[in-house]
Image: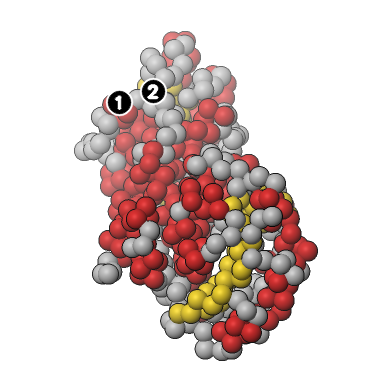
């Protein structure tokens, strides 16, 4: 018979803790560990009255530190993690125990159904889904060690490291990398049960668009992405298929500008002549002063026909990889504003006119608003990664809008600043633009979405976003400058000194958060 350890961080949970513990003890656990921290109510007294193991800390430990400390002191074969403010009937907790008894390493609360609800997904759901994609475990969707209840086997805890539980997304990543068997046996609506704490859930500070809990969880996910990048490189091992040496030619280009509006038709998929001709006509009607077609198509008759229609043609004799046509076209164009489009998609003259008009009005980057795609259930990979990047850049109101998608237009001053080479990795270009405080404006049109990439391009697509995040982290820190919310890593470090195998992780944490022993 497996021994069950139940771990419950507690901070001022006197209102519900008694009920929580009554349900937990119906499971006949080997031990119930309560990590009482920063409590000023009767929480400690209540825990002691139930014969719990009480780990008492006078001051708050911060988000998730109690989980790690409870795990360190636990002795059971199965560890069940709960919160002290959520009364969950014991029958609903049994599947999380039985799943581990049946051989799984981790049992998670199955929250996948949240993606089917009739509203746009919350930022936290996007973070979870994107992290699972980057760790190549898309089948987990938004299921994560961030959410409770969940359970872990003793063997899995040893492989993850008890101290890593202080940053649940990082623990999730390590579990995936260790190829642990992660099961989602049951859905429990913990959102409805969650106690609203104004200091965590409601109060938005002046320097962030997020409530404190979001800041903490975003930073935690960035720590997990940072770990992946350190492990596998700036693209986390995702393929590229681009000719990087060719891209590196396009750094800076000081050229006298003679045109006001340039348009680049990126013909990467050898569009029919009729399609490109249609866009040339519409771009002319939208008052483009210069139209350039960058193409991989070696059809000389097609190029000659495009020249007769008044377009400049840059024929490339081989495929150089996705999006490089953007860098080439922008480099050789003469306009102070550069519009990029795809000839295989149905954009109208009015779409192009609206984009140019937005830049005339002062925008630095303008594109067609595709946020309606977030109303699809469930959302796809493209929406997820686009939205993730905007969340990390503290631009959540931009939803999933991205210069990865066509059409969009960028001021020459922005291109000169971020570099022509950046345009070949659109998420990186977008990240650099935001970090340099340029303004992106989405425009409402009839166009709702662009084509999704195929499987090969999916790999490049994810890698491009990881590369952008890697650059972002290099300019901030491993949490992207997001707050850790007062996590008391010192308390964990005191225990790490007794656990030699955990020392390398805590050495990194200690250096980053600049605390002394």
**403 lies above or below 479:** above
Q: Would you call the spot at circle 1 few (<14 residues within 10 Å), some (14-19), or many (20 or more)? A: few
Dot label at residue 320: 2
Dot label at residue 306: none
- What residue sits right under mark 1 in the picture? 246
The x, y position of residue 33, in whole percent, is 57, 71
382 or 68, nearer to the observer: 68
Q: Which color mode does the image show?
A: secondary structure
Q: Is residue 25 left or right of residue 229?
A: right
Q: Tell me, yes or no, if residue 473 can be seen here.
A: yes
Do the residues under discs 2 and 1 have CB atoms within 8 angstroms?
yes
Q: Dot 1 lies on which element?
A: helix
242 or 276, nearer to the observer: 242
**301 lies above or below 256:** above
The x, y position of residue 161, in whole percent, is 45, 54
Q: Dot 2 lies on which element?
A: loop
The CA distance from mark 2 to mark 1 is: 8 Å
**341 lies above or below 32:** above
Image quadrant occupied by the N terminus: bottom right
Image quadrant occupied by the C terminus: bottom left
The x, y position of residue 321, in whole percent, is 42, 25
Residue, x 64% and y 59% (percent of image)?
3
Question: Farthest right residue?
Answer: 91
Question: Farthest front residue?
Answer: 1
């Amino acid at each position: 018979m497996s021994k069950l350890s139940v771990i419950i961080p507690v901070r001022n949970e006197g209102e519900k803790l008694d009920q929580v513990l009554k349900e937990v003890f119906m499971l006949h656990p080997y031990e119930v560990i309560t990590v009482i921290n920063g409590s000023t109510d009767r929480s400690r007294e209540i825990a002691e009255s139930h014969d719990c193991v009480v780990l008492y800390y006078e001051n708050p430990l911060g988000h998730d530190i109690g989980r790690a400390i409870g795990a360190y002191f636990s002795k059971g074969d199965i560890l069940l993690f709960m919160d002290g403010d959520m009364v969950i009937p014991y029958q609903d907790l049994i599947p999380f125990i039985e799943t581990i008894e049946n051989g799984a390493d981790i049992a998670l609360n199955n929250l996948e159904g949240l993606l089917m609800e009739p509203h746009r997904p919350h930022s936290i759901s996007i973070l979870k889904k994107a992290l699972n994609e980057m760790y190549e475990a898309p089948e987990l969707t938004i299921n994560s060690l961030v959410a409770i209840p969940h359970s872990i086997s003793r063997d899995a805890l040893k492989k993850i490291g008890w101290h890593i539980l202080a940053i649940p997304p990082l623990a999730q990543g390590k579990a995936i990398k260790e190829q642990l068997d992660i099961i989602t046996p049951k859905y429990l609506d913990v959102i409805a049960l969650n106690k609203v704490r104004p200091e965590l859930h409601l109060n938005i500070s002046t320097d962030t668009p997020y409530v404190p809990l979001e800041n903490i969880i975003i930073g935690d996910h960035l720590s997990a992405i940072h770990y992946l990048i350190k492990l596998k490189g700036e693209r986390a091992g995702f393929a590229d298929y681009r000719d990087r040496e060719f891209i590196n030619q396009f750094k800076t280009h000081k050229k006298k500008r003679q045109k006001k509006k340039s348009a680049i038709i990126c013909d990467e998929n050898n569009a029919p002549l009729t399609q490109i001709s249609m866009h040339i006509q519409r771009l002319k009607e939208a008052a483009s002063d210069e139209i350039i077609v960058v193409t991989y198509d070696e059809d000389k008759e097609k190029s000659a026909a495009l020249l007769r229609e008044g377009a400049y043609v840059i024929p490339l004799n081989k495929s150089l990889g996705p999006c490089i046509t953007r860098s080439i076209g922008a480099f050789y164009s003469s306009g102070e504003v550069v519009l990029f489009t795809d000839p295989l998609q149905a954009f109208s003259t009015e779409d192009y006119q609206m984009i140019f008009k937005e830049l005339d009005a002062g925008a630095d980057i303008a594109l067609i608003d595709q946020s309606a795609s977030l109303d699809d259930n469930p959302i796809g990979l493209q929406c997820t990664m686009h939205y993730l990047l905007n969340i990390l850049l503290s631009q959540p109101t931009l939803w999933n809008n991205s210069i990865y998608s066509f059409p969009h237009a960028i001021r020459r001053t922005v291109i000169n600043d971020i570099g022509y080479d950046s345009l070949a990795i659109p998420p990186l270009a977008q990240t650099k633009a935001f970090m340099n405080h340029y303004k992106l404006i989405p425009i409402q049109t009839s166009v709702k979405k662009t084509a999704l990439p195929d499987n090969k391009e999916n790999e490049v697509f994810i890698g491009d976003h990881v590369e952008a995040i890697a650059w972002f982290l290099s300019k901030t820190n491993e949490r992207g400058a997001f707050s850790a919310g007062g996590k008391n890593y010192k308390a964990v470090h005191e225990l790490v000194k007794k656990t030699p195998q955990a020392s390398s992780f805590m050495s990194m944490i200690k250096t980053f958060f600049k605390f002394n022993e």
